[in-house]
Amino acid sequence: MTNVDILTIGHSSSTFEEFLDRLRGAGATAVADVRSAPYSRRHPQFDRAPLRAYTLAQSTTSCS
């Protein structure tokens, strides 16, 4: 059986680039958006569709 680390992260007011840098820095290879309401009024770049598109474009697996 392979050990798997599960990490958590908040987007805060980060840009996509800052967010992705933090994910890569932690060694993350996939993103699962588990928010019950996957939208942000203040930071629309973290709505489900743009977040998914951006992570896939950056070769990070999106699981949302």
Image (tube, helix red, strand yellow):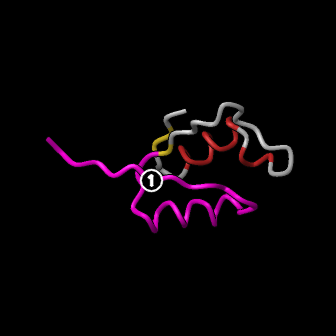
Q: Please indicate whether residue 50 sits to the left or right of residue 32 in the image.
A: right
At label 1, the amino acid type is Leu
From the viewer's side, name the closer residue of 58 and 52. 52
Q: Please indicate whether residue 57 sits to the left or right of residue 16 in the image.
A: left
* Residue lying at 55% horizontally and 32% vertically, measured from the top left: 64
Q: Secondary structure at mark 1?
A: loop
Q: Is residue 10 above or below residue 1?
A: below
The rendered magenta stretch, by its main secondary structure, is classed as loop
From the viewer's side, name the closer residue of 54 and 43. 43
Q: Position of residue 23 (x, y in %)?
A: 50, 60
Query: How many numbered discs?
Result: 1
Instruction: Give the extent of the magenta segment.
Output: 1-30
* Residue lying at 73% horizontally and 40% vertically, measured from the top left: 47
Q: Please indicate whether residue 28 sits to the left or right of residue 41 in the image.
A: left
Q: Quadrant of residue 26?
A: bottom left
Residue under label 1: 7
Q: Is residue 2 above or below residue 20?
A: above
